[in-house]
Image: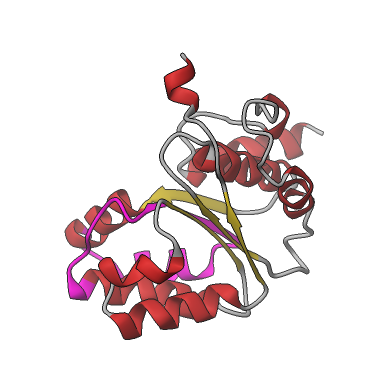
Amino acid sequence: MAKEIKRMRYLLQRSGIKRIKRLEDFDWKFNPRLLRSEIMGFSESSWNTEIKNLVLIGPSGVGKSHLASAICYKAIQKGIPTAFISCFDLVNKLKTSTNKHTMLLYYSTVKLLCLDELGYVFPTQEQANDIFQIISKRSELVSTIVTTNLIPSHWGKIFEASTATAILDRLNLNGSFITCEGRSYRSKK
């Protein structure tokens, strides 16, 4: 038991999750249109044997990042290596990395990757290609979660059209696109 707890702490520290979020703490009644059963089903995945992609789409404040982080935390509790990173942080890490290849390899192979806040940063062409390479290499091998404020038809605003189409194609394979509608939790406070 102590060994499992130690491993979980290690995975959590390495994951990039800044603050633990849990599905049990999510206020489903505040935005009842969210597809609770689909999200809960996704969180119960057997990450070692199932490859699933999830794209959570919606305006700021509806709980996309909370849900994605909670799903990642649940995977960590099962002993699954997980990475949770905002697109802004990923782009900055890639820009300043002294060993970009190692970083690309890590994000391409970690069992569960969450790219948070796609659409809030506009990467250069090289950075967009790096994001594409990560998602492409993950395709059919490991699971990816993306949170975004942009509907898929608007991804051409941040990527070239061909890159956006290719990324969406790979995420759509074994993937679910869930639109999160409702009020902002932040305006509730």
In percent of the image, x 41 and y 70: which residue is there? 153
Asked whether residue 158 appears in the rendered view, the answer is no
Query: Does 24 sit left or right of 94 as displayed?
Result: right
**In the image, what residue occupies the spot 71% across and 47% down?**
35
Q: Is residue 112 above or below residue 185?
A: below
At horizontal 65% and vertical 29% (from top left) the residue drawn is 26
Residue extending farthest right: 1
Q: Is residue 2 magenta?
A: no
Q: Estimate the x, y position of residue 127 in percent, counting from the top left.
A: 24, 69
User: As displayed, is residue 78 above or below residue 118?
Assistant: above
Q: Indicate whether residue 120 is drawn in magenta.
A: yes
Image quadrant of residue 134? bottom left
Can I make out residue 58 in this image?
A: yes
User: Viewer-proximal residue, 40 or 51?
Assistant: 40
Residue 10, quarter of picture = top right
**Where is 89 relative to 98, above or below?**
above
Q: Tell me the quarter of the picture where residue 139 sits.
A: bottom right
- In the image shown, does 148 or 143 lie closer to the viewer? 148
Q: Position of residue 102 (x, y in %)?
A: 36, 68
Instruction: Please state if 124 lies on the left or on the right of 25 as rendered.
Output: left
Question: Residue 91 at what x, y percent from top left?
Answer: 26, 58
Q: Which quarter of the rendering shows the N terminus?
A: top right
Q: State the image coordinates of residue 52 (x, y, percent, origin top left).
A: 68, 67
Q: Which residues lie in the magenta part?
A: 97-126
Q: How is the image coloured?
A: secondary structure
Name the residue at 43% across, 43% down. 59
Q: Count the marks: how many? A: 0
In this rendered view, identify the residue nearer to me: 98 or 22: 22
